[in-house]
Image: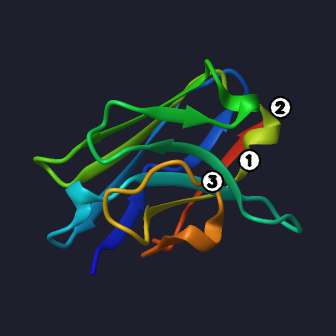
Amino acid sequence: QVQLVESGGGLVQAGDSLRLSCAASGATFSQRSMGWFRQAPGQEREFVAGIDWTGRVTRYLDSVEGRFTISRDNAKNMGYLEMNMLNAQDTAVYYCAVRNLRWSWGSRATRDFESWGQGTQVTVSS
């Protein structure tokens, strides 16, 4: 079982950048695709970015494409989300999670992910 802990959130101004980290424990992290999700108050949790187990394939929510970059370092059991040009609509609690199947890629659905961390708050003031 993989366990995840997010960090790096904070209060920033519009246009600023943040880098979120996801520290993983467990032997199968490097065998699972990883995703970053976010949930704003009163809204459903939504997919933000995903990366396959090799780190070579990524996909993004349309509204963050070109501003956010997902990456991972399997040797360190770490995942990252670099966020640039932040705006007020990016305000949310951000979560990392891993696919519930090894060697599986493509889903954006929260039901296909597991081992959710506790989340890290990102607040962007305009």
Name which residue type carries label 1: Thr
Residue 88, given in percent of the width and then of the height, sits at: 81, 37
User: Farthest residue in the right direction?
Assistant: 42
Name the residue located 65 percent from the left edge and 21 percent from the top edge.
85
Q: Nearer the viewer, residue 45 or 59?
A: 59
Query: What residue sits right under mark 3 in the picture?
Result: 108
Please identify, in this view, whether the residue under mark 3 or under mark 2 is nearer the observer.
3
Quadrant in which residue 60 is drawn: top right
Q: Nearer the viewer, residue 2 or 105?
A: 105
Name the residue located 52 percent from the left edge and 50 percent from the top edge.
9
Residue 25, given in percent of the width and then of the height, sits at: 21, 70
Please, is residue 103 above or below residue 81 in the view? Answer: below
The quarter of the image holding the N terminus is bottom left
Please, is residue 33 above or below residue 55 in the view? Answer: below
The alpha-carbon separation of the residues under discs 2 and 1 comes to: 11 Å
Q: In this view, does 58 lie to the left or right of 75?
A: right
Query: What residue sits right under mark 1 in the picture?
Result: 91
Secondary structure beneath dot 1 equals: loop
Query: Mark 2 or mark 1, which has the lower sequence index?
Result: 1
Please, is residue 9 above or below residue 13 in the view? Answer: below
Numbered label attached to residue 59: none
Q: Is residue 89 left or right of residue 97?
A: right
